[in-house]
Image (spheres, rainbow, N blue to C red):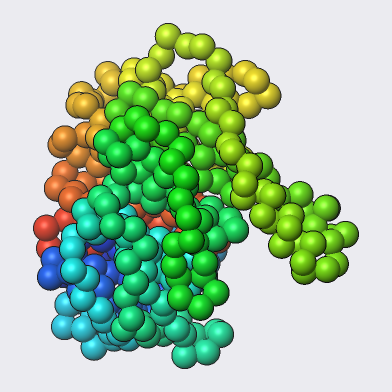
Amino acid sequence: MMRATKKIKIEGDFIDSFIYSGTLFLVDTQLKLTSYAWHDLLNVTNCPSDLNLTLHQCFSNMRMQNIYNLDDSYTIYNNILNQHCCDELFLDSWPTDLDIYKNNFLISSNNGIQTFKFNRENSLSAKVKFENKVNTLWSNKVFELAVGNLDRLIISCGSMGAFELFTNSYSQYKLESEKQLNEEEWIGCEWDNSTGIAILKNQLKQELLKFENLDQEHLKVLTDQRDRNKYYKTIKEEDPIEYEIPNSTQKYINSWIFEDKVYLFSEDLDLYIYENNNLNKVSEIDKTQRPIGKIINSAKTHFGLVFEDMENLYVQNSDINILSNKVTNWRTYPKSKNYQNHIHFIEDDNLTIQIFE
């Protein structure tokens, strides 16, 4: 039986969504990036007013005690959505990925990476205004980007390989230098700050890299900022080492760092965990429940394994359940503080934000 789940459908023609610190960002098919205060949008669904507090608790704070009191689905209609726009900015190309670092938006595309700042009305506000100055951080095609620490990020650039970018975010977010990590073809990447492990991804190929971690105890004794800066510089100059996974006959189609552990998803649709130098199977997809096609994307989340084939978007916890049979894009937030129970998936005429108990 699938865990209790509820959803909010937002009418509109979208291509991507991102939720961050109380602000929902939407990109539509006209390449317009729009910001909304998530709290305000939750106030204008067709949810009855006596359940509005429960709606906020479930969709904003992961407080799920009263989730069963909610209806299965609510709607935010397009004309109402437009009334609650905080700001908008037009992009010049179709985004391949996006992320936020220190109030800087990073958007990758076939044209590279563009960045721009946004500002809140005050430190507690979810209402965001974009700065009009757009900077080009990188000028070649980028498939995915992953933000690390110390103003660094990793980018996967297809046949150009993968790079580590060293940036400066203090005034205008700009590139200071870059280092090629690998010359092979990569279309995906992620970087976990807690473990220092990064993953470069391609179909049936994963490469794990271990970066030097910040020693927090050492930082405590460095009271002079100049000494701290020297230490940061040393960390950034260290080359990552390849993070070895034991030899296996399996081919892996995806991998993630989740709760400080390495998970690998095999071509046979088995999920493995690697910890303490041991590789163990933790679950498998029961293909007798329903036929599963070639997997084109997948994610490990707190509410189960999400995966997409050419026909459907699925989630597996105890059983396999279809979330959508017409999805065009989707995103999860496993490292978020307040939105770990969210999945956002886009269909032809709406965005669905679905939560799980």
Residue at the farthest front position: 177
Residue drawn at x 49%, y 24% is 272
Residue at the farthest right position: 221
Residue drawn at x 18%, y 50% is 328
Position of residue 137 in the picture relative to residue 65 (left or right)? left
Q: Quadrant of residue 245?
A: top right
Residue drawn at x 31%, y 83% is 132
Number of labelled discs?
0
Residue drawn at x 52%, y 67% is 168
Question: Can residue 27 be spotted in the picture?
Answer: yes
Position of residue 357 in the picture relative to residue 150 (left or right)? left
Q: Nearer the viewer, residue 23 or 176?
A: 176
Residue 53: percent from left, percent from top: 47, 77
Q: Nearer the viewer, residue 299 or 190?
A: 190
Q: Quadrant of residue 12?
A: bottom left
Residue 64: percent from left, percent from top: 51, 60
4 w.r.t. 130: above or below? above
Residue 79: percent from left, percent from top: 16, 83
8 w.r.t. 356: above or below? below
Residue 38: percent from left, percent from top: 39, 76
Position of residue 140 in the picture relative to residue 199 (left or right)? left
Residue at the farthest top position: 249
Q: Nearer the viewer, residue 28 or 119?
A: 119
Question: Can residue 319 be spotted in the picture?
Answer: no
Quarter of the picture containing the N terminus is top left
